[in-house]
Amino acid sequence: MGDINYTWLEQYARFTMSTPQDAVYAASLASLRDTEQARVMLTAYNEHLRADSLQTAAVYFMHSVRGLLLGIHYINAMCDKVLDLSLDNIRLYLVVKDGYPAFLFQLTDRTERAHPAPPNEGGSASNEAASAARQVMLTSYYRDQLRPLIEGVAMAGEANTGQMWAQLASILRWFKTLATQMDITDHEREAVVQGYEHVITMSPDILGLRKNLLKFKPVEIDSPYQPGEKTLMKSTCCLHYKVYGGQDYCYTCPKLSKAERQTRYEAILASR
């Protein structure tokens, strides 16, 4: 892929290239490391999310944090340049569209800098060194950026950090699967897989956990949206049933029993 595709970052990673004019909340992402500032964010978020508690809102916020995860893995494995995706360089905006809240990220400084280990350069010997350098880049981001953000929001909402980290497991695996379908080089595809394998085997200490919850055993279930094909069950419940005043469980939720999932399967098919 080489060049940074900003359209991809907007579509998949929640980055915006222009300042939202209709934001109902805005702050430096770095401010959420502070418990009080994070509580202000969760309170503003929950006015529109209508979750049963700030604890649920904190866990649901991870739907947005996965944009940061996709951003760093994309830059790490598919680009010849890098962007500063640190908390200090990102403004967070909350916008509401058709009654549904969504967070957007905006880079304060969009300067493209040299990639420390471009995936498409070097021979076999240098490839090994480049892979190690990309692993260092990912480890640093998870430890120094994602972890303090998650811990700040978790404390504000009195949420479990393990439950929050676990929300990222499915999207991480999804990105690895997406890479097999994208028009990218073999070197880039290999870098995506290497990055995935690295973070799911990192020491849990880096995440502030006793167990690395980014790794999970995938379970395939029948897809009601594409009959005859399979889809993956989520690694953990996303608490969707606790927002917007109460919802059904997701079809892919691990909390559903086999009978409950079959009932949902038939209902979804009938509605299509």
Image (cartoon, rainbow, N blue to C red):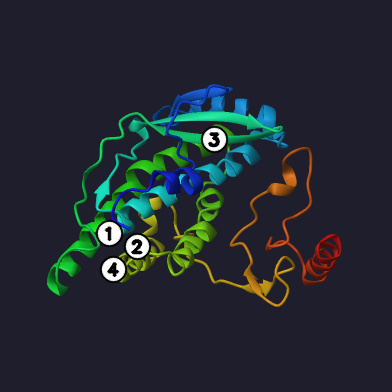
The span from disc 4 to disc 2 (Cα, nearest Å) is 12 Å
- The residue sitting at 58% across, 62% down in the picture is 235
Residue at image coords 57%, 40%: 61
* Real-space Cα separation, disc 3 to disc 2, in angstroms: 25 Å
Residue beneath label 2, please?
Answer: 195
**Farthest-out residue, bottom:** 228
Q: Are marks 4 and 2 in contact (CB under 8 Å)?
A: no
User: Cα distance, mark 3 to mark 1?
Assistant: 28 Å
Q: Are marks 3 and 2 in contact (CB under 8 Å)?
A: no
Choose the circle earlier in sequence order: 1 or 2: 1
* Pointers 1 and 2 in contact (C-beta within 8 Å): yes
Give the crowd class for mark 4: few <14, some 14-19, many >=20 residues within 10 Å. some
Indicate which disc residue 53 carries: none
Compare residues 21 and 68 and report the one nearer the observer.
21
Q: Which residue is mark 3?
A: 103
- Indicate which label's residue lies in the foreground, 3 or 1: 3
Q: Disc 1 designates what residue?
A: 135
Q: Earlier in the sequence, mark 3 or mark 1?
A: 3
Residue 95 appears in the picture as rendered: yes
